[in-house]
Image (cartoon, rainbow, N blue to C red):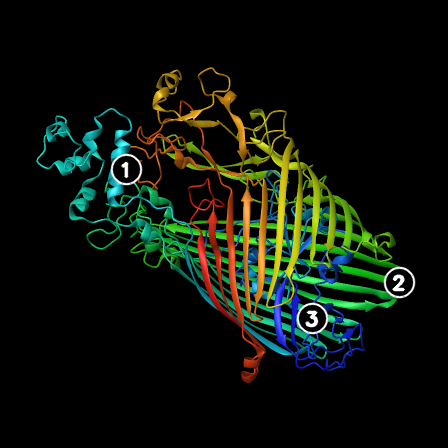
């Protein structure tokens, strides 16, 4: 029999791709000879035979003949992740040969979800990596690898872009340009970056030109952003009812006097309601009792309300467009792209836009020499001013948005300067320009030298230019400075790095493989910052920051920063018989920011990997296809020193001298500041050095059931010493504190990841990926023997432990006598019941307990991917943080009294005798004679993405000369389950967007 056109399907790295390409060529079978080059085969076989088809790179397929004379064969490309190339720092390696803990995500895995940022690519896809969730139009989110290893230094991982350290913002990197992202997590992988890598490394590889004709790709999408979770405030009637309950709460007046006189309780007369007062307008008296001011009362009578919630939140629009061209002609490969992104936030006024461009070129200049350029440019606009949504619970629905003349009213409920400000004053009256232009490039040369040695020279300059101009108009009723205020801040940042890399790679007798890498690195960073301000502009401030000279109070300040660093690195990778792999490295780092006696430090590491399934004694275990045991140990550093204000400062090790003036009084009694003095405002520390993290990692990679299931298990144990913290000093020294290497923390955890190919043939294909991580840390030592109560640091406890009073519930009406024993607390039914640990009827620090953690106790994610009937791809991802608690002081129900603190509220439950809840306090509850915070469980499961894509068949595209086309629709932040959390998003306690996106991807 012979085959007709074979519908061929292949699956690549969990991304399903269909193509009708006719018969497979060069396919072999176990009954007859191989097919010819066109894939046509003729096989003589019994009617009950089973045919086995195989081709290199594809999973063998067994097909029963069942008396058929014509069979179409479908082969599935084998997902051999072991041959994937991963970044290991100053080089790459096959995953099979890697000795460290490196997790990877390919851009093709997520192309149907159209990630908007690097954070979107990583979220939920890397075990051990926590990705925050931003509320801003810019998007993104903070990254944290394997928990906190420091108290005050930076916890952000090092970013490596195309093999070079990148100090810019992740928002400058277009996700459409990304080929893959590798996250390096263990000491052996990180040690090659030495003093910069204790917090992990995120290595991003961008797309390059590939062989073949030029390919033009267009990815264009539009979408909307809506409020993912409502946190409503009271409307007009609800606000009045709530205000009445607020005023009833103290119980000093009859409850009925706060009722609407037109709707009194049964048995209550108007005379009783008046309570001794006289009025011709009971409604006005009632509203006055509720604390409403004149304009609120007038608006109530007129039936006029303001829906502040609706004004503050909107449906934002978004668009993202990228066009790229890639190819390789003869000795020149190229990839070039240009992209534009614009996002409107769900908060009125919030907006972010950026143009991003990339050029990657590589050319063979000579037989032994390759030259290349990777260049990235971004122009960000972050000047939009958001409305102040934080005022939401301070605004009355009976306030006024506008004045009578059409201008915005400063205080919607009071002309005397009390109560909440209009949240739209700043975006309406003020003007801000915040434009940032960044350029990052790498010029490289690779030379092949004798004896199998290659030399690579990387020169990577970066230039960032920031302009932040502000005008606070005198027309803004919230600006009290006559003539307004304006400022112009400009900063230029320049940095360069040079890497000299020698590499020698040799395979001996197909048994021994040796790879040696030597690196000499140098870097410099410099910034120039200038701030000019003025105020009191005359005759008008209409020009704002465009004409600073017309003000009457000019001020100029500047701040320049420079630091340098250098490093030497040696690394050897040795492989034996394709089953034993050894890695050893040592890096010597220097950094100008540390003390004169501690400018340099050494960071060694070693690792071993054993592919035990290559052993002969494992060959008979058919269900286990691959197994590799990895062990690594090493030392990494953290050089991101912060000052007492938490700002990274490379001068903390130095003494600081400030100049100032002091006042003198002349003989005739005139005061002036004319005498200049010089004072030493900061103590230097000549022994200030790196934080050092010693880390052990044990890992197991596995593949079972014909590699249908594969994954990895990791255990790590890290100890960080010489933590950079402020040491308090005696007042006798003249200094408050000095930054020193004093504390230590330990950090350990477990990670598990597994990928399962559930369905691999037929009309439905299905893949599942599960990631699980847990992390535990502990403070081993602080600057002194005592705990640091101010920062909440406790020796022997987690960095994020919560130390506060344990809440047992709410005091109920039948517990009045017991509550009264706390004589200093003034406790009443409806107040929170705190645990009195020592039983002395006083609440002191002796009663505080460790009641939970701010960080998750474990995280997990689950991704499912389906291919349906060749053309449809469906995927969804769940991400979860579990076991943490968040501050939830809304449960205190303390809205304040009439006057400056008079507020509205989110619609929340509150305790009343008729509603004796144990979860929420009464209105204007008591702090029980102390102060405390309320914490609630903030565990959540988020439906992070839902994506559907339709690939247009080639039979249609061929008629219009289009290589491929895909239409996709996705929803980000699609749903949230947080059973014990009643605020905004539990991950950031703010209003987060839900994105709906419709797009088209074309390749020409």
Local packing at callout 1 (Cα closer than 10 Å; few below 14, some 14-19, many 20+) is some
For this view, does 350 lie left or right of residue 479? right
Q: Where is residue 828 in the image (x, y as percent from the top left)?
A: 35, 23
Residue 242 or 596: which is nearer the viewer? 242
Q: Earlier in the sequence, mark 3 or mark 2?
A: 3
For this view, does 723 lie left or right of residue 904? right
To which residue does mark 2 refer? 510
Single out the residue that lies furthest toward the left.
280
Instruction: Label 1: state its secondary structure.
Output: helix
To which residue does mark 3 refer? 75
Q: Position of residue 740 (x, y in %)?
A: 64, 35
Instruction: Label 2: state its secondary structure.
Output: loop
Single out the residue that lies furthest toward the right.
509
Local packing at callout 2 (Cα closer than 10 Å; few below 14, some 14-19, many 20+) is few
Instruction: Label 3: state its secondary structure.
Output: loop
- For the residues labelled 1 and 3, say whether their Cβ atoms are less than 8 Å apart: no
Q: Earlier in the sequence, mark 2 or mark 1?
A: 1
Quadrant of the rendering where the C terminus is positioned: bottom right
To which residue does mark 1 refer? 242
Q: Quadrant of residue 457?
A: bottom right
């Amino acid at each position: 029999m012979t085959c007709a056109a074979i519908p061929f399907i292949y699956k690549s790295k969990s991304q399903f791709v269909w193509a009708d390409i006719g018969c497979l060529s060069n396919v072999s079978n176990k009954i007859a000879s191989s097919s010819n080059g066109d894939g046509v085969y003729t096989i003589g076989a019994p009617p009950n035979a089973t045919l086995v088809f195989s081709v290199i790179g594809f999973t063998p397929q067994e097909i029963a003949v069942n008396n058929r004379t014509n069979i179409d064969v479908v082969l599935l490309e084998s997902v051999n992740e072991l041959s994937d190339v991963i970044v290991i720092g100053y080089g790459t390696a096959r995953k099979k040969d890697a000795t460290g803990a490196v997790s990877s995500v390919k851009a093709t895995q997520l192309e149907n979800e159209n990630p908007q940022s690097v954070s979107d690519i990583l979220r939920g896809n890397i075990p051990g990596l926590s990705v925050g969730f931003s509320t801003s139009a810019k998007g993104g989110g903070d990254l944290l690898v394997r928990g906190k290893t420091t108290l005050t230094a930076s916890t952000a991982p090092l970013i490596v872009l195309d093999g070079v350290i990148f100090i810019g913002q992740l928002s400058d990197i277009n996700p459409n340009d990304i080929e893959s992202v590798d996250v390096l997590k263990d000491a052996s992988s990180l040690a090659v970056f030495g003093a910069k890598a204790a917090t992990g490394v995120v290595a991003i590889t961008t797309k390059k030109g590939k062989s073949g004709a030029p390919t033009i790709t267009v990815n264009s999408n539009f979408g909307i952003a809506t409020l993912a979770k409502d946190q409503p405030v009271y409307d007009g009637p609800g606000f009045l009812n709530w205000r009445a309950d607020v005023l009833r709460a103290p119980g000093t007046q009859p409850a009925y006097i706060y009722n609407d006189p037109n709707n009194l309780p049964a048995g209550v007369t108007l005379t009783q309601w008046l309570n001794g007062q006289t009025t011709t307008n009971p409604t006005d008296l009632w509203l006055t009792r509720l604390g409403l001011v004149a304009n609120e009362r007038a608006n109530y009578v007129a039936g006029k309300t303001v829906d502040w919630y609706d004004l503050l939140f909107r449906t934002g629009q978004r668009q993202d467009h990228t066009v790229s061209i890639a190819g390789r002609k003869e000795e020149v490969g190229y990839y070039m792209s240009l992209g534009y992104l614009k996002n409107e936030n769900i908060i009125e006024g919030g907006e972010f836009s950026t143009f991003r461009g990339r050029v990657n070129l590589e050319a063979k200049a000579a037989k032994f020499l390759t030259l290349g350029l990777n260049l990235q440019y971004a122009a960000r606009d972050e000047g939009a001013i958001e409305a102040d949504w934080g005022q939401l619970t301070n605004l009355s629905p009976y306030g006024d948005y506008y004045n009578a003349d059409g201008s915005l009213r400063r205080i919607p409920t009071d002309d005397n300067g009390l109560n909440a400000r209009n949240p739209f004053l700043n975006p309406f009256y003020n003007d801000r320009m915040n434009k940032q232009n960044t350029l990052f490039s790498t010029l490289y040369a690779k030379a092949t030298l004798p004896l199998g040695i290659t030399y690579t020279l990387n020169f990577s300059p970066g230039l960032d230019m920031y302009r932040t101009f502000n005008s606070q108009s005198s027309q803004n009723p919230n600006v009290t400075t006559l003539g307004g205020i304006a400022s112009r801040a400009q900063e230029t940042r320049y940095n360069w790095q040079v890497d000299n890399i020698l590499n020698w790679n040799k395979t001996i007798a197909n048994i021994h493989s040796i790879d040696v890498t030597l690196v000499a690195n140098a870097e410099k960073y410099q910034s120039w910052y200038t701030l000019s301000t003025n105020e009191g502009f005359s005759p008008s401030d209409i020009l704002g920051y465009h004409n600073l000279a017309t003000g009457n109070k000019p001020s100029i300040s500047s701040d320049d920063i420079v630091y340098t660093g250098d490093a030497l690195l040696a690394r050897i990778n040795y492989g034996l018989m394709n089953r034993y792999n050894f890695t050893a490295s040592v890096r010597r780092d220097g950094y100008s920011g540390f003390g004169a006696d501690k400018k340099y430090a050494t960071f060694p590491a070693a690792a071993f990997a054993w592919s035990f399934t290559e052993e002969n004694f494992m060959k008979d275990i058919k269900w286990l296809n691959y197994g590799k045991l990895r062990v690594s140990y090493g030392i990494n550093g953290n050089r991101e020193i912060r000052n007492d204000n938490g700002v990274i400062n490379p001068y903390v090790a130095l003494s600081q001298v400030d100049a100032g003036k002091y006042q003198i009084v002349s003989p005739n009694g005139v005061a002036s500041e004319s005498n200049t003095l010089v004072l030493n405002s900061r103590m230097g520390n000549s022994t200030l050095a790196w934080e050092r993290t010693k880390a052990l990692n044990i890992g197991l990679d596995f593949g079972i059931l014909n590699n249908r299931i594969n994954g990895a298990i990791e255990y790590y144990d890290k100890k960080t010493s010489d933590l950079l913290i402020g040491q308090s000093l005696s007042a006798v020294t003249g200094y408050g504190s000095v930054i020193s290497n004093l504390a230590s923390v330990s950090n350990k955890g477990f990670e598990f990841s597994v990928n399962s190919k559930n369905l691999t043939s037929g009309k439905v294909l299905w893949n599942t990926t599960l990631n699980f991580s847990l992390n535990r840390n502990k403070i081993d030592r602080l600057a002194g023997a005592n705990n640091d109560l101010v920062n909440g640091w406790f020796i022997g406890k987690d960095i994020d432990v919560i130390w506060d009073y344990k809440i047992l519930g709410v005091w109920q009406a039948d517990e009045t006598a017991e509550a009264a024993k706390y004589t200093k607390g003034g406790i009443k039914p409806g107040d929170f019941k705190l645990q009195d640990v020592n039983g002395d009827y006083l609440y002191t620090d002796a009663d505080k307990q460790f009641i939970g953690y701010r960080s998750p106790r474990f995280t997990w994610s689950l991704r499912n991917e389906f291919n349906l009937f060749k053309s449809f791809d469906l995927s969804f991802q769940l991400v979860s943080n579990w076991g943490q608690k968040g501050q939830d002081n809304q449960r205190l129900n303390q809205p304040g009294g009439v006057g400056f603190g008079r507020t509205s509220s989110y619609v929340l439950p509150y305790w009343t005798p008729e509603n004796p809840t144990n979860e929420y306090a009464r209105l204007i509850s008591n702090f029980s004679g102390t102060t405390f915070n309320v914490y609630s469980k903030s565990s959540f499961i988020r439906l992070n993405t839902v994506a559907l894509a339709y690939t247009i068949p080639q039979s249609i595209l061929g008629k219009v000369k289009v290589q491929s086309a895909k239409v996709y629709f996705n929803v980000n932040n699609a749903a949230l389950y947080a059973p014990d959390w009643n605020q905004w998003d539990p991950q950031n306690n703010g209003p987060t967007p839900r994105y709906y996106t419709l797009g088209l991807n074309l390749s020409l």
